[in-house]
Amino acid sequence: MKKFVMFCGALVVISALSLTGQAEEPTEAEIAARDEAFSKSMAKCVLVGSFTIDGKESEGAPKAERYEIESVTQASENLWIFMTRVKYGKLDTKLPITVPVEWAGDTPMVSLTNATLPGLGEGFSARVIFHESRYAGTWQHGAIGGHMFGKIERATDEGSKDAK
């Protein structure tokens, strides 16, 4: 019992130290560099991966998904414009989609809540993080939702013509 109490005490000390040693806010130069790196990393890329639908996991493997991104530019402090190619049903068009991007340290995350997307409808929510050459997150469209994940690949002219 004495060892357990000592262990709990050590955890309290470690927790207190980690809370007081939180990272400092980034400087304006660090924010500008971070934002520029994000914009460059997302230019002319394709998100190639899979998505699941909650409640239908037993129906087999996740479904394939593909999102073509021509560019990502900052519109204001946390709003970014993703110039995308959208293929949804009979719709196949380039479309600027403005979404909030939040930062967890150096990791960007799209944070969309009950948004309307032109040509696609309303009630879209998502939390998607981008890290190195991967993305992962959750999505919701009305009452239907699930998970999404995959790789961020460089787009090719051929890939853009044959997007699925």
Image: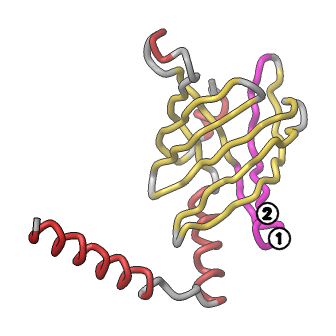
Vertical order, 38 against 145 (above or below): below
Q: Is residue 143 above or below residue 9?
A: above
Instruction: Pick whichever, 137 or 47, lies toward us.
Output: 137
Q: Is residue 139 rendered magenta in the image?
A: no
Q: Is residue 2 left or right of residue 105?
A: left
Q: Quadrant of residue 101?
A: bottom right
- Mark 2: which amino acid? Leu
Q: Is residue 75 magenta?
A: yes
Where is residue 21? Give x, y as percent. Answer: 42, 87
Q: Residues within 10 Å of mark 2 (few under 14, many from 20)?
A: some
Image location (x, y in percent) of residue 98: 82, 53
The front one of 91 and 62 is 62
In the rendered image, which quarter contains the N terminus? bottom left
- Residue at position x 18%, y 71% in the image: 5
Asked whether disc 2 touches disc 1, contact meaning CB atoms under 8 Å apart, the reply is yes
The answer to whether residue 103 shows anywhere in this view is: yes
The answer to whether 50 is drawn above or below residue 115 in the figure is above
Q: Main secondary structure of the magenta part?
A: strand
Q: CA distance from mark 2 to mark 1?
A: 5 Å
- Residue 130 image position (x, y, % from top left): 54, 54
Q: Is residue 85 left or right of residue 103?
A: right
Residue sitting farthest toward the top: 59
Q: Secondary structure at mark 1?
A: loop
* Residue 154 in picture, x, y percent from top left: 53, 48
* Residue placed most toward the observer, 115 or 164: 115
* Residue 79 disc label: 2
| Amino acid beneath label 1 | Ser
The residue to which callout 1 is attached is: 76
Query: Where 12 sits versus 52, above or below?
Result: below
Helix or strand or loop: what does disc 2 sit on? strand
Magenta-highlighted residues:
70-89
